[in-house]
Image (spheres, grey):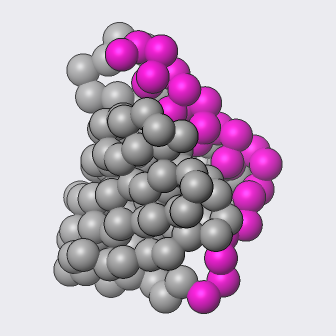
């Protein structure tokens, strides 16, 4: 499982550092309205591995940490002030269902599962906003 966690965290870092754009037509979710882009720390609960930092330009990427295909359909399952659950289907690439619990606008719990390239996965992360990407202020 450790290798899969590292792969998921590596995907997060690749997304943040590459500045991958998300499809523009996705409406904002109620739970994510107060959550700002910036430098985010992600760690797997209970893991001995150090948290990984990533510059997140668009918080929508937090719903698709593994599945980055650009042509995906999105179905919002739950959208409340504190919880958002979204299912993405990306033909030929897989699908993912992610739930984000917004504890505060700077502290999230992310639970994601699905199938990518024919392989199942299930991830959980604690995410904390550290500050702006360039300032890295805490």
* Residue 32 visible in the snapshot: yes
Q: Nearer the viewer, residue 137 or 64?
A: 64
Considering only vertical position in the picture, is 33 above or below 21?
below
Kindly identify the residue that appears in the image at 44 percent across and 75 percent down: 74
Q: Quadrant of residue 97?
A: bottom left
* Residue 137 visible in the snapshot: no
For residue 2: magenta? yes
- Residue 38 percent location from the top left of the image: 61, 57
- Residue 111 percent location from the top left of the image: 28, 47
Q: Nearer the viewer, residue 126 or 116?
A: 116
Kindly identify the residue that appears in the image at 24 percent across and 75 percent down: 77
Count of numbered tags: 0
Considering only vertical position in the picture, is 98 above or below 115?
below
Stretch in magenta? 1-25
Kindly identify the residue that appears in the image at 47 percent across and 38 percent down: 118
Q: Quadrant of the N terminus?
A: top left
- Residue 42 percent location from the top left of the image: 45, 37
Kindly identify the residue that appears in the image at 41 percent across and 14 percent down: 2
Considering only vertical position in the picture, is 44 above or below 16?
above
Q: Is residue 123 left or right of residue 25?
A: left
Most common secondary structure along the magenta stretch: helix
- Residue 92 percent location from the top left of the image: 58, 55
Q: Quadrant of residue 54?
A: top right
Q: Nearer the viewer, residue 99 or 117?
A: 117
Q: Is residue 4 left or right of residue 120?
A: right
For residue 111: magenta? no
């Amino acid at each position: 499982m450790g290798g899969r966690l590292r792969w998921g965290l590596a995907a997060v870092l690749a997304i943040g550092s590459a500045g991958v754009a998300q499809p523009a037509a996705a409406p904002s979710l109620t739970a994510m309205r107060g959550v700002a882009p910036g430098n985010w720390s992600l760690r797997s609960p209970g893991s001995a591995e150090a948290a990984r930092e990533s510059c997140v330009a668009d918080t929508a990427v937090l719903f698709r940490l593994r599945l980055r295909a650009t042509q995906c359909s999105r179905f919002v399952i739950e959208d409340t002030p504190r919880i958002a659950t979204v299912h993405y289907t990306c033909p030929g690439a897989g699908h993912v269902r992610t739930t984000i619990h917004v504890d505060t606008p700077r502290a999230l719990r992310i639970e994601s599962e699905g199938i990518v390239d024919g392989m199942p996965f299930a991830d959980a992360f604690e995410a904390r906003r550290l500050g702006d990407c360039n300032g890295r202020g805490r």
